[in-house]
Image (cartoon, rainbow, N blue to C red):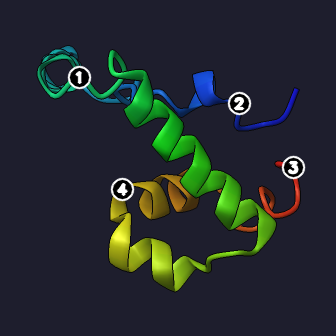
Amino acid sequence: MTSAEPSLCHVKPNPATTKAVQDSVTHTIKELRLNLDDSLVQIRFKIVQSYSKGNIDMAFLEGYYPFIAEELKRQGKQDSIKGTIP
């Protein structure tokens, strides 16, 4: 199992935020179907996989997929994820 299986590419509210913020984020995630539409989860996984393989760099992520770029940085995985997803 790799560190970024598609199931781990689900969008979740940060547990460190208030309950009100978590509820709002959860509502937005449901409204936008970010986790219900498997194709969206698969797209996020493929993007992270491409970054891990070195096919795209952080500048590309920041320009085209800023949410993914910020999450990799926030989670401290900007470097550690490289080479971990076949």
Q: Is residue 28 left or right of residue 50?
A: left
Residue at mark 1 to residue at mark 2: CA–CA distance = 19 Å
**Disc 3 target residue:** 86
Q: Where is residue 26 in the image (x, y as percent from the top left)?
A: 22, 18
Q: Are marks 4 and 1 in contact (CB under 8 Å)?
A: no
Q: Where is residue 78 in the image (x, y as percent from the top left)?
A: 66, 65
Q: Are marks 1 and 3 in contact (CB under 8 Å)?
A: no
Q: Position of residue 53 (x, y in %)?
A: 79, 65
Rendered residue at 52%/35% (across/down): 42
Looking at numbered disc 3 in the image, what kind of residue is underneath it?
A: Pro
Residue at mark 3 to residue at mark 2: CA–CA distance = 11 Å
The residue mark sitting in front, 4 or 1, is: 1
Quarter of the view holding residue 83: bottom right
- Mark 2 secondary-structure assignment: loop
Q: Are marks 1 and 2 in contact (CB under 8 Å)?
A: no
Return the residue found at the far front: 39
Rendered residue at 23%/21% (across/down): 22
**Disc 4 target residue:** 67
The residue mark sitting in front, 3 or 2, is: 3
The residue mark sitting in front, 4 or 2, is: 2
- Mark 3 secondary-structure assignment: loop
Instruction: Classify mark 4: residues with Cα within 10 Å, few (<14), some (14-19) or many (20+).
Output: few
Looking at numbered disc 2 in the image, what kind of residue is underneath it?
A: Glu
Residue 33 got which mark? Answer: 1
Q: In this view, does 29 lie above or below 76?
A: above
Looking at numbered disc 1 in the image, what kind of residue is underneath it?
A: Arg
Residue 5 got which mark? Answer: 2
- Looking at the rendered structure, the number of numbered marks drawn on it comes to 4
Rendered residue at 35%/65% (across/down): 66
Q: In which quarter of the image is the N terminus?
A: top right
Q: Position of residue 25 (x, y in %)?
A: 19, 26
Sequence-first disc among 4 and 2: 2
